[in-house]
Image (cartoon, grey):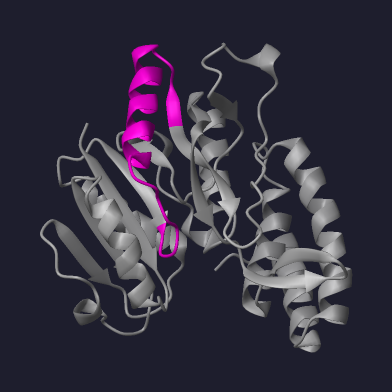
Amino acid sequence: MRVGGLFVLYDADFELFNDVLMPIYDQVDEICIVDNSSLDNTLKILFLPTVKYIPLYENKGIALAQNVGIKYFQKRNIDSILFMDQDSTFPKNTINKLVDSLTFLLGLDVNVAAIGPSSFNRLTKKMYSFQEKKKDTILPVSNEIKECYAIMSSGSLVPIDNFDIVGFMNESLFIDAVDYEWCWRAWNKCGMRSFVDLSVAIEHQLGSPGKFLWRDISVSSPMRLYYQFRNCIWLSKVSYTPTFWKLKVLRKYICKFLVYPIFFRPRISYLKSAIRGIIDGLFGHMS
């Protein structure tokens, strides 16, 4: 199986990114780097064969950047795409294990949308949760491979032909929940199933580290908060969004609406971003 590694960058720390790049380079057949930064950073990236760098010269969102990379690989005789963030670290043999698990599932004639590793917070070392499907609704697969409703983009391995069937990433979402929406669409439209392989784990960091009372939390920027509220509201109106997710994010964002403008600066910017996101989500202003 030929695997293409797809990175999406935005104002990356290139010293860190080059350290991330090298272990990946040894585990995939080709790499495509799509850069949402305002500058051409060609000279800051390690020059390696089979690495393609595509600058976009402005932040066009993760969904559009991913689609650029997908379309590039569709012309490159690639079987599956591994999606990655600029700061996610992959231990040795992680990708080989994911490929083996994907091959195992396909060998069972399972209609696979995507498979990804488990992940844990880089700072707190706590595992990120995922919503496993009820055991009585699925076929038994493996003790280490669990079916779930959706997986996060970073570390996900997707057969490239799936994009001809399901479609590309939803560019109107720009950044938040792009990965979840695609997985839900794949299940609703085509019966394609998403999986987490518990035998592999990667480090990941959602947002900037912060504290609220005694808890370690991830703190979003005002701009990111806008997209979170907008996309949450918009997706809650989409028929194939799971009900449990709608209820979960409703509680979560009520808390965020109350907490961010009071406890985090810039308070007014957080309040305005949340209100604007709610209004745009309600009225479908997704441009």
Q: Quadrant of the C terminus?
A: bottom right
Residue for point 67% across, 40% down: 241
Quarter where residue 104 is shown:
top left
Residue 160 horizontal/vertical position (percent): 30, 38
Please identify the quarter of the rendering in which residue 211 is found.
Answer: bottom right
**Numbered label tally:** 0
| Location of residue 30 with respect to 57 vertically, above or below | above
Horizontal arrangement in the rendering, residue 214 relative to residue 187 (left or right): right
Q: Is residue 72 visible?
A: no
Work out which residue is located at the far left of the displayed protein and give it. Answer: 49
Image quarter where the N terminus lies is top left
Q: x%, y% of residue 144?
A: 53, 24
Span shown in magenta: 85-113
Q: Position of residue 172 (x, y in %)?
A: 52, 61
Q: Please tell me which residue is depicted at 36% across the width and 84% down the height of the picture.
A: 38
- Residue 118 visible in the displayed image: yes
Above or below residue 34? Residue 147 is: above
Q: Residue at x 24, y 73 (%)?
A: 45
Report if residue 99 lies within the magenta region: yes
Q: Is residue 46 magenta?
A: no
The answer to whether residue 51 is left or right of residue 265 is left
Q: Residue at x 45, y 34 (%)?
A: 115
Work out whether 269 lies above or below 148: below
